[in-house]
């Protein structure tokens, strides 16, 4: 199990297929809402893929807003949940944030995943709000300086 940065278009196509399966098909997010101007290799954000037994099964991305890393589009294909892959995705994105000099990361977490993020050191920083008809909360984490 490992996370690799998406560095070629084929990596992005795989990440998009995973996101489409989880967010669009499974959770009902409209296709036009799932993909945006940050879904490129242009450097506006960085995408990663997580592998299980050499097969890509999860993804996430990070972009930077006013020096804060924003973790986004974190998902794992349903048969591969419960193998600890979510933690691998989060840690890989946090490492990218630290490489870029960010001292804090944030995310809009689905409320059903709030406990997962809390175990990884995130704290809830908002009331519940809706994104694509799914309840979310803003969560923050201070990164340790190296």
Image (cartoon, grey):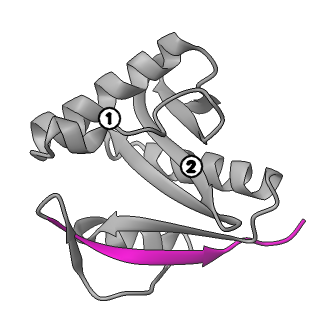
Foreground residue, 56 or 45?
45
Q: Which residues fall within the magenta stretch?
A: 134-146
**What x and y, as percent, mark residue 78?**
23, 37
- Residue at disc 1, secondary structure: helix
Can residue 54 be seen?
no
Residue drawn at 32 percent across, 37 percent down: 35
User: Split into 4 quadrants, where in the image is the N terminus?
Assistant: top right
Which residue ends up furthest to the top in the rendered image? 10
The residue wearing badge 1 is 80
Residue 136 shown in magenta: yes
Front position among marks 2 and 1: 2
Which residue ends up furthest to the front in the rendered image? 37
* Side of 9 relative to 133 (left or right): right
Which residue ends up furthest to the right in the rendered image? 146
Residue drawn at 52 percent across, 28 percent down: 40
Foreground residue, 144 or 6?
6
**What x and y, as percent, mark residue 139?**
45, 76
Marks 2/1: CA–CA distance: 22 Å
Residue drawn at 38 percent across, 66 percent down: 108
What type of secondary structure mainly makes up the magenta span? Answer: strand
**What x and y, as percent, mark residue 19?**
30, 34
Can residue 145 be seen?
yes
The residue wearing badge 2 is 62
Residue 43 shown in magenta: no
**What x and y, as percent, mark residue 119?**
48, 72
């Amino acid at each position: 199990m490992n996370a690799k940065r998406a560095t070629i278009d084929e990596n992005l196509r795989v990440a998009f297929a995973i996101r489409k399966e989880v967010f669009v098909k499974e959770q009902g997010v409209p296709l036009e809402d799932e993909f945006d101007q940050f879904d490129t290799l242009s450097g506006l954000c960085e995408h990663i893929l997580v592998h299980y037994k050499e097969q890509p099964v999860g993804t996430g991305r990070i972009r930077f807003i006013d020096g804060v890393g924003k973790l986004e589009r974190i998902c794992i294909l349903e048969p591969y949940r419960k193998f600890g892959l979510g933690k691998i995705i989060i840690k890989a994105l946090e490492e990218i944030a630290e490489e870029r000099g960010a001292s804090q990361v944030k995310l809009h977490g689905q409320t059903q995943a709030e406990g997962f993020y809390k175990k990884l050191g995130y704290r809830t920083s908002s009331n519940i709000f809706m994104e694509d008809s799914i309840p979310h909360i803003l969560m923050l984490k201070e990164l340790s300086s190296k």
